[in-house]
């Protein structure tokens, strides 16, 4: 869970910097990609924990 929160914070910081700084749009894109990867990671982790409880 610490990894999830750390990546979420980094994605938010990169997104804010990319959106506000002139010419740093690539940081916004990297932040969005990190956020999407973090959501996928959380979904896989939650799905895996549900399966292990059912067994």
Image (tube, rainbow, N blue to C red):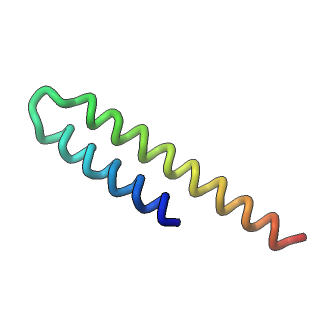
Q: Which quadrant holds residue 29?
A: top left
Does residue 18 sit above or below 3 in this rendering? above
Image coords of residue 35 (percent x, y): 42, 47
* Residue at screen point 26% across, 44% down: 15
Q: Which residue reaches farthest left?
A: 22
At 57% across and 48% down in the image, what residue appears?
40
* 14 horizontally vs 54: left or right: left
- Quarter holding the C terminus? bottom right
Q: In this view, does 49 lie to the left or right of 32?
A: right
Identify the residue at the far right of this view. 55
Q: Is residue 1 above or below residue 11?
A: below
Which residue is painted at 49% across and 50% down in the image? 38
- Looking at the image, residue 36 sits to the left or right of residue 16; the answer is right
Number of numbered discs on residues: 0
Q: Where is residue 41 in the image (x, y as percent from the top left)?
A: 58, 51
Q: In which quarter of the image is residue 28?
A: top left
Q: In the shown orientation, is residue 4 left or right of residue 17? A: right
At 41% from the left and 53% from the top, the residue drawn is 7
Instruction: Write down the quadrant of residue 25 in the picture.
Output: top left
């Amino acid at each position: 869970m610490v990894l999830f929160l750390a990546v979420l914070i980094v994605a938010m910081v990169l997104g804010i910097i990319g959106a506000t700084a002139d010419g740093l749009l690539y940081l916004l894109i990297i932040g969005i990609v990190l956020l999407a990867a973090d959501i996928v990671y959380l979904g896989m982790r939650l799905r895996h924990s549900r399966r292990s409880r059912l067994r």
